[in-house]
Amino acid sequence: MHPKKILHPTDYTDTSRPALMEALSLAQEHQASLVLLHVVDSLGPEDLTYGESASADQPEAYRRRLFDELRHVLPPDTHIHVDCVLSEEELVTAILRTQAEFGCDLIVLGTHGESGLRRWLTGSVAEEVVRRATCPVLVVKEPLTPARLPEERPTPLHPGHLSRSDG
């Protein structure tokens, strides 16, 4: 597989960071372009959170701020073509529509790796994208920090330390 256009949906969390690094690595390796997608609940003035003053251009200022944040997700020395996309759609719909509109031939996304009841109740965005996408999807799970095991202390097994119970 040699992708030419890679889609990476990001929510700026630690979960999406490993997927971004993988998408960047693949884009550089295959000289592909990258499409960064960020989905927001609303781009309307009632949802402004950046302290812009109330004015007619408030939604536009908010959009500019979101685009700036999206552009700063990438390391500055990246030499690949990047398109930034903001969407107000439902997350899976936004991912699938962006993939189709930009002709992306690979989607690289992160997952929380939830399982059990929580996944059953909330569903999995990654799972739905994998099922419905018309191109390959690479799901990058957030790396887990290995549990710290207690230090092993070897127990000397000398004949004098063994006891026997004749019960």
Image (cartoon, rainbow, N blue to C red):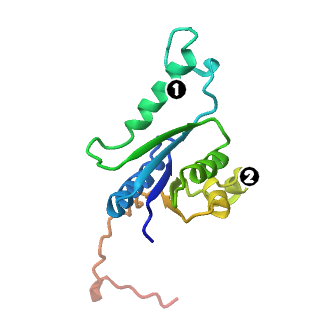
Q: Amino acid at mark 1?
A: Arg
Rendered location of residue 23, percent (x, y)? 42, 56
Can you tell which of label 2 and label 1 is closer to the viewer? 1
For the question of whether residue 49 can be seen, the reply is no
**SS assignment at label 1:** helix
Please determine whether, in this image, residue 147 is positioned above or below residue 83: below
Residue 86 position, x and y percent, is 54, 36
Please tell me which residue is depicted at 58% across the width and 48% down the height of the picture: 98
The quarter in which the N terminus is drawn is bottom left
From the viewer's perspective, is residue 162 above or below residue 130? below
Q: Earlier in the sequence, mark 2 or mark 1?
A: 1
Q: Which residue is mark 2?
A: 121
Mark sitting on residue 63: 1
**From the viewer's perspective, is 164 left or right of 152?**
right
Q: Is residue 26 above or below residue 44?
A: below
Q: CA distance from mark 2 to mark 1?
A: 32 Å
The structure residue drawn at horizontal position 48% and vertical position 60%, both measured from the top left corner, is 140
Q: Residue 94, position in %: x, y? A: 63, 45
